[in-house]
Structure formats: C-alpha cells, structure tokens
Image (cartoon, helix red, strand yellow):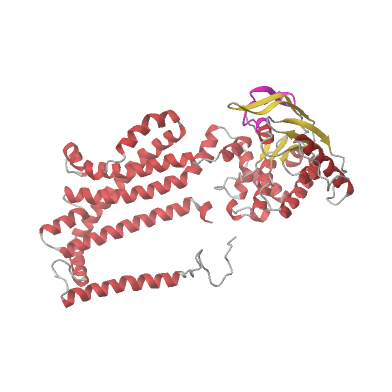
Amino acid sequence: MKRDAGNSQQVDALGTPVLSSGQRYLLAFVSILGTLCLWQLATAVGWINEVLLPSPADVIKALIGSILDGSLFKNIAASLLRVIEGFLLATAIAVPLGIAMGVSRTVFGLIDPLLELLRPIPPIAVIPLTILWFGIGELSKVLLIAYGAFFPVLVNTIAGFREVERVHVHAAQALGANRYHIFRDVVLRSALPFIIVGARLGMGMAFIVLVAAELIASNAGLGFMINDARYNFRTDQMFVGMACIGILGFGLNLLLLKIEGRLLRWKTS
Amino acid sequence: MIEKLARSEASSVLLQEVSVSYGMQQAVCKLSLEVRGGEFVCLLGPSGCGKTTLLNVIGGFRSPSCGSVSIDGIAVHGPGADRGVVFQEYALFPWFTVAQNVQYGPRLRGATKSELQEITDHFLGLVRLEEKKHQYPNQLSGGQRQRVAIARALANRPKILLMDEPFGALDAMTREALQEELLRIWETDRRTCIFVTHSIGEAAFLGDIIVIMKSHPGRIHVALENTVPRPRQRTSDAYFAMYRKIDAALRDAHDMRPDSSLAA
C-alpha cells in the first residue's frame, strides 16, 4: 500500500516538491553537459594552461588513443581483477568471522580487542610493509585490498547479528524451530541487510586501496596508468584514468545495489 | 487432514506455585492456576503485574525460578509447537511472504507442497486474507498483520493458543473487529486459549474466566467466571454488569477507589 499514491504533486517533509525521474535525469544531463562546456571554454579561451588542464576534447582524444593501443582495457582488466579478488577474499573471511563473533560472545571477546587495535590503521599505512613482505606483484595488491574491505564487512556483519529481534526467535521456537532453523531463518535473515551494507562499504574501500597501491608500486592498472602519465606529463591520460576509476566504482556500486534489491525485496516492496 | 487435527482434544494447563525473578526483583510470586481444556482464560492487570511473564513461562520462553508448569500433566521444558503464540508486537517474519509465514511451522515438520498449499489456503481463508498471500508483512496494515499472525499460530495446529496483548497496538475499531474474528474462529473448535490483556472490555468480551492480577510481585487477586452468555453483545446488560464486576475487582486489587460513575 503506497500511502501517497494518487497525489498529483508529491512534497517532502519540508514541503519542497518532489521531482519526477524525468525531471531528475534532465537536471543531471544539464549539470554534466554544462560543466563540460564550461571546461572546454576555459581551456579554449586560455584561462587555464592546457598542459595542466587538458580540454575535454583532448581527454576524449587520449581516451580513443588508449583504447586503440589496447592499454586502457589491459589496465581496466588488471584493476578490476584485483578489486574483485581482494573483495571476495575479504568477504570470504569477514562474513564467517562476523557470524562467529555475532553468535558466540567468547569468540567476540577474543577477537574484538585485536580488531579495535587494527581497525584505525588505514590500509595505506600498511602498503610499505606489504611491499617488503609480498613484493610488488599481484599478491601484495590483492592482500591490501582485502585488508581494506575486510573491516567494513566484518563490523557490519557483527552489527547485523546484534539486531536479531527476540520476538522473531520466540515466534520461530513456538512454531517448532530448532537452533539450526533459527539460525537459517531468523538470525541470518535479520543480519543480511547489514552484511550487504558492509559489502557496499567494503567495495568502496577496496577501490580506494586499489588506486593507492597501484600508484605506489605496480606495472599495470588504472592507478599505474595515472602515475605513468605523470612521468610523461600526459595530463589528458591522467583524466582518462581518473574517469575510468569513477565509472568503474559507480558501476560496481550499482551492481551491488541491484543484488541488494533482489535479496531484500521484503524491505522495499 | 486439517479437519481431523482442528478438532484436537482440548488441553489443560496447570501452574503450581510458580515464581519468576528478574535479578533481585520478583516478577511473579507463588502463583497457581489451572486452565481446563477448552477454556478461554484472560489474564488481566496493569503493566508490571507479571501477566506477560506468566505467558512467557507457559510458552517456555522463560523457566520459573520455582514451581512447575505442565500441559496435560507433562512438564513444560522450553518452547514447543504444542503452544501457538501470538505476540504483542508484529512478530511476523518480515523477510517471508504472508504465505511463507503461515506455512513456516508445517514446513519445518516436513509437510508436502500440496499440504502446504492446502494449509495456507485454509488458514488464510479463516482470517479472510487469501488475497494477500504473496505480499510481505510490511505491505499489510496492523490489523491484517495480526490476523496473519493468528493464522500462522493456528496453521501449526497447536493444542493451546497463547496470546500476549495481540490487539494492543490496534485502533479501537480494528481491535473490536479482530476480537469478533478471534471468537468466531475459537468457537469452531474451542481450543484452550490464554489471552493477556489490560483491557476490561476485551476480557469481558472474550474470556470464560478472567484472572485478575495484582502487582509487585505478580500474583492472582481473583479469578472471575464470565457469566455473559455467548454469543456476546457489547451492548447487552449482561456485558455491562460483567464489565462493572471486573472493574470493581481490578480496583480492589490495586487499591483504587471504586468508580462512582460505574457503581450501580
């Protein structure tokens, strides 16, 4: 039942009219196109040194160039693979550990102090050590990304288990559920929304760590592409790399939102 | 299959000298109560009189610190499918559809697909919500959710129905409609029913026996037999007389002055 169904003009709590999706797309289009025009104008007129800020046209030229020589796809593939490997590794450890910590107070008591000590250390601070330990190959990057994504997933998984409602457990028990049933049908189901939020935050973190790791030590990937362009003073290529990171992050977040919508239909419907 | 089990023999409940403590505080003190098979018993009292605690003890969610609870002579240890519970809050599983909620108990016991289908249709039909089968609880109104909760409890074919202020959060008109619906369903098989409420009107309308409770610690003040003949009418003189009787007993239990406007 939609409460506002039938109202021709929807307003929010402050009385501001709510825009239709068509209107929102139009505004987004105007905003992006307007910025690009202004940017092109600024460089064409010469307000800004074109070496430092290439025009949109130059960026597109660089984009086409890097597509044609195959370097862009090679770099995107390298970055994407690392993010996905690191993210999956983090999730594969953090979710079971979070479940164990959520279910058992003893496990929580043992692990939580360590986590609280490690959590404030930004993954970027760990990069030099990782290079010493694992070199500059794939392994060190994947591990760094996993480290970055690990905490958001873990913390949210634990939080999810704390949200289990006693009344749902009682209801299941009164219907004949045993401990396994309660875990499967109540505990896991209650925690799922939190685990998914953790996964999205973890994915965001994985991206940040990815680029940082690639900037510092690597021979492929979007972060490498940006840093390499700096040595050659190719700001246009830097912009291509940055834009690709943005689009990739946006796309992965969209994918996770889609999965979330699928799994949590009961919340949104 | 449903027909046969719906006429389950009514079960009796026996509480002997039950005490329950939360830390230092005693919530229920040496309380004894017998509920005979097929009776509709209302536990009535203000908040903090231990009526919900008592229901939790019968439900097996909380074990008494002393005393014993038995159903048909068998001691209660933990919750079980023989006691269906309808809770105060919306205890439906929000991640399951209405049909999945109603099927939950039978599904755990390994009912077949066609049996589950039959059970869902039968019990949702009983509460007149067949058309909401595929919706999620958050798409239903409060009254509809509690009707699904009743259907879910009944679909598991419990021997006893325990209800903890199930209509407390509903508006007055929905509440009356659901009371009538509950009685209509109860009268088809006269299953033993224990119903917690703080509404005198609700107790007078539903119960065969009205157990009036005292607070601090929770204990029974008096158990009144409801003399209003069924089917009951909320406007009948018998109903008003019963209402006054319950009100007087409740005021007596809690040392309140008699209500002069009600004194006949």
Q: Is residue B87 above or below residue B27?
A: below
Left or right: residue A85 versus residue A234 is right
Nearer to us in this view, A244 or B200: B200
Nearer to us in this view, B112 or B9: B9
Left or right: residue B162 versus residue A57 is right
Residue range of the region highlighted in magenta in the rendering = B56-77
Relative image position of residue A225 (x, y in whole percent): 18, 56
Relative image position of residue A199 (x, y in whole percent): 38, 47
Q: Quadrant of residue A134?
A: top left
Relative image position of residue A209 (x, y in whole percent): 26, 48
Nearer to us in this view, B112 or A198: A198
Queried whether the magenta region covers residue B76, the answer comes back as: yes
Relative image position of residue B31 (x, y in whole percent): 72, 26
Q: Quadrant of residue A238?
A: bottom left
**Quadrant of the image containing the N terminus of chain A:** bottom right
Name of the residue lying farthest toward the bottom: A45
Question: Which residue is located at x 55 percent, y 72 percent?
Answer: A8
Q: Quadrant of residue B85?
A: top right
Q: Is residue A138 visible?
A: yes
Left or right: residue B91 versus residue A41 is right
**Quadrant of the image containing the C terminus of chain A:** bottom right
Q: Is residue B58 above or below residue B179?
A: above
Question: Which residue is located at x 10 percent, y 57 percent?
Answer: A231
Q: Is residue B136 visible?
A: no
Question: Which residue is located at x 87 percent, y 40 percent?
Answer: B227
Q: Is residue A33 above or below residue A241?
A: below
Q: How many marks?
A: 0
